[in-house]
Image (spheres, grey):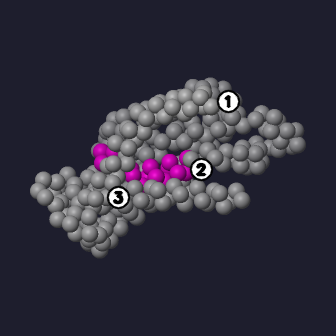
Amino acid sequence: MRNIRQNRMAVFVFLLPAAILFIGIIIIPIFMSLKYSTYKWDGITEGTFIGIKNYIDLFTSKSVGFPQTLKNALLLALLSVVIQLPLSLFLAIVLARGVKGEKFFVGLFFTPVLISTVVIGQLWMKIYNPDYGIINAALRSLGLESWTRVWLGDQNTALFAVFIPILWQYVGYHMLLMYAGIKNISQEITEAAVMDGATGFNLARYITIPLLRPVLQVCIIFSVTGSLKAFDLIYVLTNGGPAHASEVPSTLMVTQIFGRGKYGFGSAVAVFIIFLCFFFAILIKKLFKVEEN
């Protein structure tokens, strides 16, 4: 009994610093944002309590355009799920089969995750440059001059042009998670399926992917919530422009708080982002649980 109490005390002591940091860095700021979102506040003078007016303005104020930013974020999330994750899964399955140079390619695909987002943003700004960028240069060399664009400055292409670097940066991250999950699948199961005549495609469809469900669930949650709170790469590439074509809730929040001094409204945007992340995380877990049952 004494040993059990000592073990519990040891666990408590070791968890206490992490718990204090979590409460101080995550929990308290969330509640502070929730409080400030009910105020009209410029960050300097004393705020005025206005209740849920900031939340109403999110969807009624035409000058802010929050619904458009939400639409852009949801589109990024959809593209991440239907393009980024299948590509990551394909790479993980191919590499996990033991191709030549397996470790090298795993490290190669994961490298963009380690690079600073600002550096990646500057790199892709050069790639998208309308004058000397590699994309327009390649199109001109193929005689497709009419296809060239100011990719980051065109309202029709800005959002998709922003998505490509996000895809490039994080496809290796999800690939590594899936790769590790596949490597943890028992070889006996795989060998038994092969002996029963399972081919490469059927092996992936009926053995690998079903057994990878917990990892896929985590990857989908990370992908969706990451898209909903995407900020840094979009801020570097377009700052939400042109004409809010690539604006997302996070860039709108920064613009409202630091650009216009609307700390209350910006806090309402922050709270809504947190709500969306929790909502979709719970929804995805529920969908996986229902499908499993």
What residue occupies the far left of the structure in this picture?
Answer: 45
- Tag 1: Cα neighbours inside 10 Å, few (<14), some, or many (≥20)? few
Residue 271, label in figure: 3
In the rendered image of this protein, does residue 75 appear above or below residue 26? below
Q: Which amino acid type is shown beneath numbered disc 3?
A: Val
- Residue drawn at x 88%, y 43% is 196
From the viewer's side, name the closer residue of 21 and 253: 21
Mark yes or no: residue 293 visible: yes
Region in magenta: 219-237
Q: What residue does disc 2 label? A: 217
* Mark closer to the observer (2, 3): 3
Report the quarter where the C terminus lies.
bottom right
Q: Position of residue 151 (x, y in %)?
A: 35, 52
Q: CA distance from mark 1 to mark 2?
A: 26 Å
Q: Which amino acid type is shown beneath numbered disc 2?
A: Gln
- Mark 3: secondary structure: helix
- Residue drawn at x 50%, y 48% is 222
From the viewer's side, name the closer residue of 51 and 62: 51
Q: Which amino acid type is shown beneath numbered disc 1?
A: Val
First in sequence: mark 3 vs mark 1: 1
In the rendered image of this protein, does residue 206 appear above or below residue 14? below
First in sequence: mark 1 vs mark 2: 1
Magenta stretch: helix, strand or loop mostly: helix
